Structure formats: C-alpha cells, structure tokens
Image (cartoon, rainbow, N blue to C red):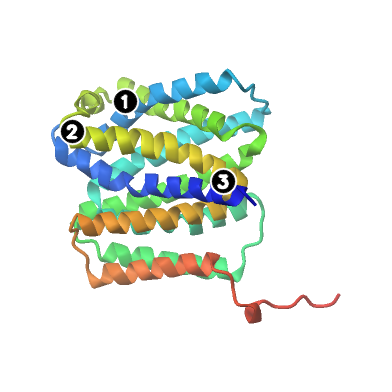
Amino acid sequence: MKRVPIDAIFVVVVGVGWGLLAPATKAMFAADPAAFDGTSVAVARAAWSLPAFVVMLGATLAFERPRLDARRWIAVVAAGICFGLGISTVFSIAAQHTSVAHIAFLIGTSPVTNSLVAALVFRLPIGLRQRIALALGVAGVALLASAQTGGRSGIVGDALMLVWLAAFAVYAVLLRYVGPRVSSLFTMSVVGVIAMGTVAGLAAVAAPEALRGVPHVLATPAAGGWFFGEIVLGSNVFAQTAYARAVRRLGVSVATIGAQYTALAVGITASIVSHEAWTIVTVFAGLILCGALAVTFVPAPARWVRAPQPS
C-alpha cells in the first residue's frame, strides 16, 4: 500500500518536467535568437546532459551488474536513439514553430497513442473505447491544426509533434519490453548516454554549426536557470528516470496518463501566463482531445459493462 503514493510522486515529477520543457525551450530562443533555434537547443541539451548521464551510469555500475539478454540490450539501445533523435530533437524543433498551448494539447494525446501502440505490439485487445478515443484524437488534432495562427510555420510545428507522438509511443513500448530486470536508474543512464551521445556526435560530424548554442546557455541568468534547471535536469535526468520507474511499476497506460495530465495542466498554465493568443477553435479542439483521454481511461459505469455470457 505504501508503494502507490511513492509511484504517484514519480508520475507528478514526470509531468512537471515535461510540462515545463516547452516554455523553457522558448525562453532559450528569446534569450539569444542568434545562438538558439530548435536544433541548437537540442544539441546544447545533449552536450551538457551527456556528462550527467555518464556519471549516473558509472555510479550505477558500481552497485549493479545488469543481466539482460541480447534482445533487451537492443531495446535499450533503440530506446536511446529514439529518445535522442525522435523525442528530444524533434520536440525542440517543434517548439520553435508552434505554441506552448498546441504542444501541451498534442502531448496530452500521447496516452491514447501509447496505449494503442502498446496494444498492437503486445497483442492486447483494442476495445471500442480505444477506437472512439483514437477517432476523437484525430478529430481534435485536425481541428487544432485548423486553429493554427502561425501560418505554415505553425503547421510544421504541429506536424513535428505528431512525429514526436509516434516516437514517444515506440519509446514507451521499448522501456516496457526491457522490463524490471534492471533498475530504472541504470536503464535511463544507458538510454541517456546513448541518446545524448547520438545527438551531440551527429551534430559534431554532420552539422557543426548546430554546436553554436553550447557556450551560450548562460546568455542571461534566467536562460541559465531554465536550461540547467529544466532542460538538462528537470526534463532529462529527473523526468526520464522517474518515467522509466513508473512504466515498470504501473504500466505504460497508467504512468503516461498521470504524467500527461500533469504536463497538460502545467503547459496550459504556462501558455496563459505567457499571454499566448487563444481562439475558440483552440479551446474546442483541446476539449475534444481531453475527451479522448477521458474515453480511454475513465472507468465506464457498471451498467455499460456487458456481463459475460454463459458458455
């Protein structure tokens, strides 16, 4: 009974870390527009986070000897690549083009997509409620795109968040497949080293100009606080480690829905505080997406549950 409150705390940590990532990224764009765009923020995040993950991995190996088969090692490596390129980098580029509100609503649909992908991969039944939730999700995303006031750039940002949703669903399934054979700290240490090493290494080899933001993360005190407090530690180290633990103990659906409801609330609050422009269509689209979450995860009334038929 004591485990549930502890797991709930981890879920909230994940939600806060994810919910503040978009406003933190936009704060970096504003701090030094010449040094920071979506790509350079992602590369700076990787370069400054890599040492932290290396230290975490070294400390973990001092107390733990992982015992994983070849397939699960492949899953860990794949999760790292997926996190570095498909989640971290894509998110930063999307944040350059779309609003915090749109990001909040779109990542809020990830419990729906995560549960559907997990059902397909692990061959779980996909019920009527999940299909209705998917239909609502598609309708909400389409309506949200129609409410985009940023022109072509905004549509690109929303489209990139759909790529992020797909990558995040794959990432969650990979973590679930690795399972509880090793600690969440070890899993995320390895994933973090691979993810951040991949992004930083590719930038150094293929796009050295993307490294321009690395020495400018302290452009202003506020930028430094956002970068190290949220982008490096909050969303990378703390949130990802907490998410790995929550997925292992609570499952993909429960861990993701709790974290994303929290992230959604944090993101909407940040959007309002930063005085982003909202339209009635944005509000309506957000309500539809919240409805998709409710259809998926709110328990159905007992009278709706069909009694088993005698064989």
Q: Residue at x 61, y 46 (%)?
A: 249
Amino acid carrying mark 3 in the image: Val
Q: Circle 2 sits on which residue?
A: 221
On the image, which quarter does residue 21 sit in? top left
Which of pointers 3 and 1 lies earlier in the amino acid sequence? 1
Q: How far apart are marks 3 and 2 (CA)?
A: 35 Å
The answer to which of marks 1 and 2 sits earlier in the sequence is 1
- The one nearer the camera, 304 or 123, is 304
Residue 128, how many percent across, how many down?
A: 59, 71
Q: Name the residue under label 1.
A: 203
Quadrant into which the C terminus falls: bottom right
Q: Residues within 10 Å of mark 1 (few under 14, many from 20)?
A: many
Asked if residue 307 lies left or right of residue 53, the reply is: right
Return the x and y of residue 240 as percentages of the image width and height: 46, 39
Residue 35 appears in the figure = yes
Identify the disc placed on residue 17.
none
| N-terminal label among 3 and 2 | 2
Callout 1 touching callout 2 (CB < 8 Å): no
